[in-house]
Amino acid sequence: PKNKNILPGVWALKRKRRVTTGEVYKHKGRWNLDGSKQEFGIDYDQTYSPTARWPTIRTMLAMVLLHGWSSVQLDFVQAFPQAPAATKQYMYLPKGINIDGLDPNIHCFEVLRNVYGSCDASRQWYLHLTGILVNDLGFKKSAFDECLFYRGSVMYVLYTDDSILAGPNKEELDKAVQDMRDAKLNLTVEGQLKDFLGVNINRQDDKFVLTQPKLIQSIITELGLDSEGDRAPNTKDTPMASSKILDRHLDSPDFDGHFYFRRIIGKLNFLADSTRGDIAYPTHHMARFVSNPKKEHGDAIKWFGRYLAG
């Protein structure tokens, strides 16, 4: 088509690993739309897509424990393309793939489905799925959390394409899963709660133990603390030194950038929100300095890493 924005694509290759062992169990390759070349107001409009809050997830786990509920974990297969494209868009043909009868110099794809990589892909999937849940399957959306739904005695919590069904009646759970499949949603039942959003969920008698060893190890590794010879890092008993006051105007040299300060804060934020409430305050305190960290801020993050190592 003439006078249209033809968008490039990009290959995304990924190895999925188990949370507890780090074992690679799946290799994935996706041809994604390059969202960086999209134009606001032409190729996409709104982009916001909610995800479940961790207090919601923990409350659901508490209900499962307290009342002896059944629970099951669901995963949608190639979730985003299950939704239709929001606007008419076009993509160049993938490099390295020859398709009979198509010339990459004169032909392109018309995008019919919601392609990964698009700026509004997550939003379109959320609107598509929740529209089916509410309008077709009789679920009601919670006023407390946009990603929590109810139908009868069944509770359903959604985090992008990962979700949990829980309730006192296993037959109702099975019926909800079958209704989703009948509504043309392609999903797999992952069984009992085990690995969810990178969190290992271990059922021990009357409690769930939530841990993130892989994420914590990645923080320790990125900070360079696991390369201090053969010995374990010099661990700390507290996440911050109580004797130092950190602010934006320290008389200290700039941070030398030997680790990616902003990315470490992002990992710590997810860790604090999901399983480690003990680090919430120091994480939010250190997040104030991501725009212009000083050497002492970097040292404080290293202290943080030694606390996690301990």
Image (tube, rainbow, N blue to C red):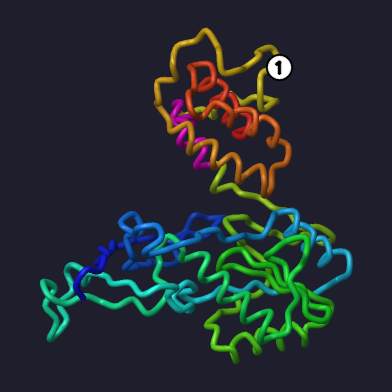
Task: Judge by depth and name the residue closer to the eye, 233 or 34.
Answer: 34
Q: What residue is drawn where x is 34% and y is 61%? A: 13
Q: What secondary structure predominates along the stretch shown in magenta? A: helix
Q: What residue is drawn where x is 76% and y is 73%? A: 155
Which percent across, then down, holds residue 211?
Answer: 66, 50
Secondary structure of the residue carrying numbered label 1: loop
Amino acid type, residue under disc 1 in the picture: Ser
Judged from this view, the residue extending furthest toward the bottom is 182
- 245 to the left or right of 119: right
Q: How many marks?
A: 1
Q: What residue is drawn where x is 59% and y is 34%? A: 309
Query: Is 60 situated above or below 291?
Result: below
Task: Judge by depth and name the residue closer to the eye, 95 or 136.
Answer: 136
- 237 to the left or right of 161: right
| Res 205 visible | yes
Q: Which of the 4 image quarters holds residue 112? A: bottom left
- State the residue position of label 1: 242
Residue 144 magenta: no
Q: What residue is drawn where x is 56% and y is 79%? A: 188
Query: Is 106 situated above or below 302?
Result: below
Which percent across, then down, holds residue 77?
Answer: 49, 76
* Range drawn in magenta: 217-229
Query: Dot 1 surroundings within 10 Å: few (below 14), some, or many (20 or more)?
Result: few
Which percent across, then down, holds residue 187?
Answer: 55, 80
- Please identify the quadrant where the C terminus is shown: top right
| Res 117 visible | no
